[in-house]
Image (cartoon, helix red, strand yellow):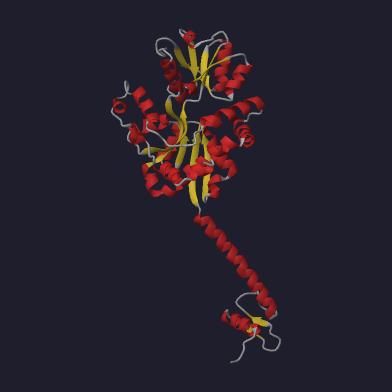
Amino acid sequence: MTKVSEQEKFLEILETFGCKVDNEDYTVVTGPSTLVTGVSWTEARRRILITLLSIGGIVASCYTASAQDKARIAWAALNPAASPMWVIQEKGLLRKLGVDAEIVGINASPIAMQALLAGDLDVIVTSVTTLVTTRLAGADTIMVQTLVPTFVDHIVSLQSITEMSQLKRKTGGVNRVGSTSDLGLRLALRRLGLNPETDTKIITAGGNPERLAALSRGFIQFTIMPEPWVREAEKLGFRDLLDTGSLGIPFHWNAVLSRESTLKSKRSLVAKVVRANTDAIHFIKTDREGTKAIFSKFLKLNDPEGLERAAKAYATIFPESTLPTAEGVKTLLDDMAPRNPKAKGADPKQFVDLSLVQELEASGYVKRLYGK
């Protein structure tokens, strides 16, 4: 049996690709490309191998890009309750799960919801208030994960007010009447024996800086705001009167919302968002310095004590289990029922889909994450 040399094998390959080789000096006389024309067979081999490796790299790169899921996500309201999404963005947590995510901040929850319903977004992170109002109106919106399962704001007052009962006949300011903060304030007042409609007056007073200014000028005597702005209020001489989170009122202050149609068509994608949020919460609970750096970037805050307080508070506020319970929906439906017949007859269980978090927890992933 005649042994075929490596040179002869490669010459056959060259001829297969349409190259004509001079049999005396083994130079490629003509070929399908100037890449190998006029060079020796060894040089031709080198160039072809380099080209094939380059093509292989491009193909692999294209395959990786096409294999990645695409996700469009928005978080609403610039406060630390949205910080799991900030962590996902800064640490590339979805990218690690094979998701090419476009994550944007939208200042108002109704605008984020409109984009979700229009199909411009796959997922939004906002409160249960946005979910309930749209679903009662007939939309297929659904909650798949809770991030903050209770109220987080603090009632801040003038220094002269030392207890909640002294809020009687006083004027309070919220960012917007009808907002989540407004509801939290009203529920807290009721829980502590005050009727917000008859015992107090609550008005729209703008964002956190505007409400602090209104306190300073005496236009309002109390307001409601989260950390790290509570620290700013105290620096101005105001009193941190009550942490509404201490009341333990079930309420999904911030949650992951999608649509039932999106869950059917992109279930694996939404499941990855749920896992990434779980990873982000673990980061916030275990990496204080990293969390403060991210808070500082997004909140544009450089006060060390304010950042420390916010990071510490939210490490406690965010739960290990992010199961979106029906109780956190029922609180809102009960509040709406006297004014909305649809809310009165609504089943809170129909507003949540527990399956994605249940599947993640059943896999043992959350327990492993926390070393349990």
As drawn, is 108 to the left or to the right of 263? right
The answer to whether residue 38 of the structure is visible from this angle is: no
Q: Is residue 154 above or below residue 131?
A: above
Residue 327 location, x and y as percent? 38, 29
Q: Is residue 329 above or below residue 93?
A: above
Residue 350 location, x and y as percent? 33, 36
Which corner quadrant of the image does residue 31 belong to? bottom right
Q: Nearer the viewer, residue 63 or 147?
A: 147
Q: Residue placed at 36% from the left, 28% from the top?
A: 330
Residue at the front extreme?
A: 372
Residue at the bottom extreme?
A: 1
As drawn, is 26 to the left or to the right of 224? right
Q: Residue placed at 62% from the left, 87% from the top?
A: 4
Q: Residue placed at 46% from the left, 19% from the top?
A: 185
Q: Residue placed at 35% from the left, 39% from the top?
A: 140
As drawn, is 100 to the left or to the right of 344? right
Looking at the rendering, in which quadrant would you find the N terminus?
Answer: bottom right
